[in-house]
Structures are given as structure tokens and as C-alpha cells.
Amino acid sequence: MKNIQKGKYRPYPKIDLPDRKWPDNAITKAPIWCSVDLRDGNQALINPMNMDKKLELFTLLVELGFKEIEVGFPSASKIEFDFLRKLVDDNLIPDDVTIQVLVQAREHLIAKTFEALKGVKKATVHLYNSTSIAQRKIVFGKSQDEIIKIALDGIDLVKKYEQNHDGEIFLEYSPESFTGTELEFAAKICNEVTARWGICDTRKVIINLPSTVEMATPNIYADQIEWMDRHLQNRENVIISTHTHNDRGTSIAATELALLAGADRVEGTLLSNGERTGNVDIITLALNMTTQGIESGLDFSDVNKVVRVVERCTEMPTHPRHPYVGELVYTAFSGSHQDAINKGLAYQKAKEDPFWEVPYLPIDPQDVGRTYESIIRINSQSGKGGVAYILEKNYGYHLPKAMHPEIGRIVQNISDEKGKELSAKEVYEIFKHTYFEVEEHISLIDFTHSTKANISTCQLTYSYNGKKIVAQGEGNGPIDACKKALMKDYKNSFSLSSYAEHSCGDKSSAKAVAYIGIQTDDFVSCFGVGANSDIATASIKALFCALNRAF
């Protein structure tokens, strides 16, 4: 970019970890999930949630299966305090859910936090203070030892108020701005914190290592997590937690690589709401695991409901291309994509093996509460297969493959002219107008036929250029017999190139649909479609349709 001073930005230094193990690891189970929608997500909103919205979102989080939920910063404001009291006083916290509250290492804030927690059976007190080089130098003007003292004083205060709390208190400590902190110092402060807390197998500690600001590529964060994994004392009693932000757009990758590197727990939000570019999106993480055959422990079988609730509570729209939940993520406009998806869905339906292998769809939309109706949509980029899919899926017309290019070209031209996407109804109207409302120079009036000794005889009555004609013909089938009867007076020569038929509709109102392709002496190919309760009549109607379109 122009006018950027040389040396203004520098590459993030590599981590000295030559024997790193995480690249060879695999994610085999889901982490402990902790939603921070009600705290981190809420504080990032233009209009923070009111009580009703907080309750609605909390209810959703419980329904989705979260067992750890950060409900707020009760010492920060009255609504944060009142919300926690509402949960307690109305007995809204399930017995298997641990709520989490954030607090800084100051006595009046910790005292207020424990006042809000009164009556809570299980709670995690999330204590944090900034540890990065920039924060120490620019914001606080403190040494490493002074920063450690802030953390330890906070631990002592939590222990003090814990003694009078009637319920279980768990500790989470975050060296906030971890990604900008020297690893040796991060390990030192975390180890002193856990020692001061009295870490043991009955007193485990969550050490949250946040990517408060995403400063490097995801592999660097994984190296940092693995380095800490090796240097945290009493590691068997430490729960390493991640809390990634999306400043570089790679929070999902950073979190997944951190899980490879030894992280046990993930903090994040639904739909990535959070400070600046957002927190890591737990929906994407969980459904990524689902596509790898890993049970996430969270229920995203109705993503439409999740999106509706989150959008209503946060007043934040969801991008139509948001992974798994966006309006358009299961939609194909491209012709080649449409063709592959159509074939893939048919293949999936026909085979016994449940393994999902539909091209361009990494997950079955039905598994997240989406339908197949919106998978293929039609615009000027769409191909012949997409149009055929719409007509079959929505209206029951199984067009023969040879007919796909013709109808695809017709629909594409109209979409080009209109300069917009066409709805399924508009596609059907084009199909109906093209094949059932064609301008006629020759019209079928009546048709009867009989078969004897494999010879079909037809009696054909039709109008040709305003003249009524009755003709008879014989052939190896009704269509052949009709053609021979027709050619006695019809002046346009043609040959039959293809034929297909099927029933359409349920048993009580089923009709037969026939498709006939013809070719003129000028090598012009054209299809006709006919429908009737009698398949022979439907076929003759299709023939007349083709003739009217061709000539």
C-alpha cells in the first residue's frame, strides 16, 4: 500500500518449538464449550441487550446444550447485576450448568460479584489482568513483578470471598492479551496464580489463553498453546482454554489448531459476535466437527431458529455467506455445481451407505434444519441441470436429459434479460408458457387408437392452417401411427429423435406426461411436452407441441 512508513509493521516472531507435536495430532473429541455471548458478545453491541433479550438468549444457550455460560460482568453495571440475580431468584440455572462471571482484580468489584452470586450452586469466577508488553509499557507502566502482584492480590480476594459463599466456586484466570505476552512471563504468572489458588485434583483451574487480538497466523497460536501446555505446572489439573478473536479472519483455524496443540476448552459466541471483527463462532466450530464424524455435544439441528433468536437479541444481521447458517450457503447458481449436486442427491438417495458424499455440500442441509428447496436457484449463471432440478423437485416434471439444454437456454436467456434471479414459480411459468401455451398452426382435435397383432391404428382429427382434417394411419405404436396419418396432409417434414414419459402427481389425480423430441430437415431440434390422463393422448399432444414450436 502507498505511504506506509518503512518499519511500521513487523512480522510476528516464530516460536522456538522445533519438536512441535500438534501438526501430527487430530481432533478426536469435542472440547468443553463455554458461551460468552452474554458477556463478551453483549459488550460489543451497539445496543446492549435488555433483560428480556438476555433471558431469551440464555434460554437458547441452555437448549443448545451449553454447560458453561458466561452470563456477564455483574460488577460493571446494574443490568448485568440484575440479570444474574434474576437467574438465581427465578431458579433459571439448570443444575448441570455452571455460570461464569468476569471480574477485574479489585476488591470492590470482587465483593460486588460475590453479592450477585449469592445462592448460585456452581460458578466460575473469571479473573483477568493484562500481561502483554504493550499493555505493561503503554497502559499500566508496570513491571512484570507488579503485574504478577495484581493477579495474586486478585486471587487472594477471590479466596477471601469464596469462604463465605454457599456453593462451589471455580477459578478461571486469563493473562489478557496473551498473544502479545512473552511466553516465559505468561507461564510464570499462570503458575504463580494456580499455586496461590491451591491447585490440586479437587481444585482444578481454568487457564484461559486468549488471542485477545489476533496478531499472527494460526500455527503461531498453536505453537504458543503447545509451549504453554509443556510449561504449566500441575498440568493434569489445569484446563487450558482458548478465547480467540478474528482480527486476521482466522479465529476458526486458530482454535482448531489450538485444540490439536493441547487446549481442552473453547470460549466463543454464536455467529461470531464480539469485539472488533468478532469472537470465534462456536456454530462453525461445532459443525466442522460434525462433518468429521465427531459428536460436538451441541444441538444445531435447527440453525434457522438459532439465527432468528441471535439476530433478534443482538440486532446484528447474519451474512448470507456465513458458514453453515447463511441464507445462501447451500445454494448453487453455477450450472456445473447444480448438475453435480443434483446427481449427488440422487446418488445419495439410491445408495444404502449413509456416508454423505454430495459434491459441493460438506454437510446435509437437513441435518441443520434446512430443506433442499433452496439448494438450486436460477439466474443467468445457472445451467440446464439446475432448471431441470427445479421443475422436478417442485413440480414433478422429470425432463429427459436430451431436453435439458433447450429449456436451460430458454430460462437463461430470460434471466439475462431481466438481470435477476428467477424464482421456482417463474421458472415453472416459463416452462408452462413454452410448452403448454404455444402458438398453434396445427391443433389436435381428437385422437383414438387401437392395437391388433402389434399394429397400431389411429384415427386423427386435427386443424391445420384453419382447415379441419381427418386422417388414419398405421404403425408400430400410437406415435408412429399418428405420424403416418399426419404426413398425408402435413407439409413440414420431420423425424422423431427422442421420447420419454412418466406419471405426475399423487395416485388420485395423477396425469401422464410425455416428452417428444423432433428434428427437421434443416437439422433443427425441438421438444414438445404433453399431459393427459391417458399416456397415448399425452404423447400425441407432445408431438403437436413440438411441431408448433419447430415450424
Image: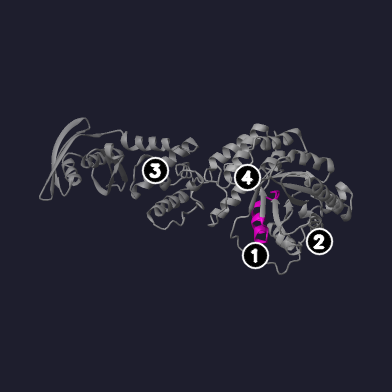
Query: What x and y, as percent, mark residue 351?
Result: 39, 56
Label ID, residue 518:
none
Q: Is mark 1 on a helix, strand or loop?
A: helix
The residue furthest bottom is: 19
Q: Which of marks 4 and 2 is nearer the N terminus?
A: 4
Label ID, residue 23:
1
Residue 357 on the magenta segment: no
Q: Which of 213 and 102 is in front in this view?
A: 102
| Residue that appears at 87% across and 47% down | 140
Q: What stretch is highlighted in magenta?
A: 244-264
Residue at the disc numbered 2: 184
Q: Is residue 287 left or right of residue 508?
A: right
Q: Is mark 2 on a helix, strand or loop?
A: helix
Residue at the disc numbered 3: 393
Q: Distance between the residues labelled 1 and 4?
A: 38 Å
Q: Residues within 10 Å of mark 3 (few under 14, many from 20)?
A: some
The amino acid pointed to by label 4 is Asp
Q: Which of marks 1 and 4 is in front?
A: 4
Query: What x and y, as percent, mark residue 341?
Result: 45, 51
Q: Distance between the residues labelled 1 and 2?
A: 23 Å
Residue 260 on the magenta segment: yes
Q: Nearer the viewer, mark 1 or mark 3?
A: 1
Q: Residues within 10 Å of mark 1 (few under 14, many from 20)?
A: few
| Residue that appears at 47% across and 45% down | 375
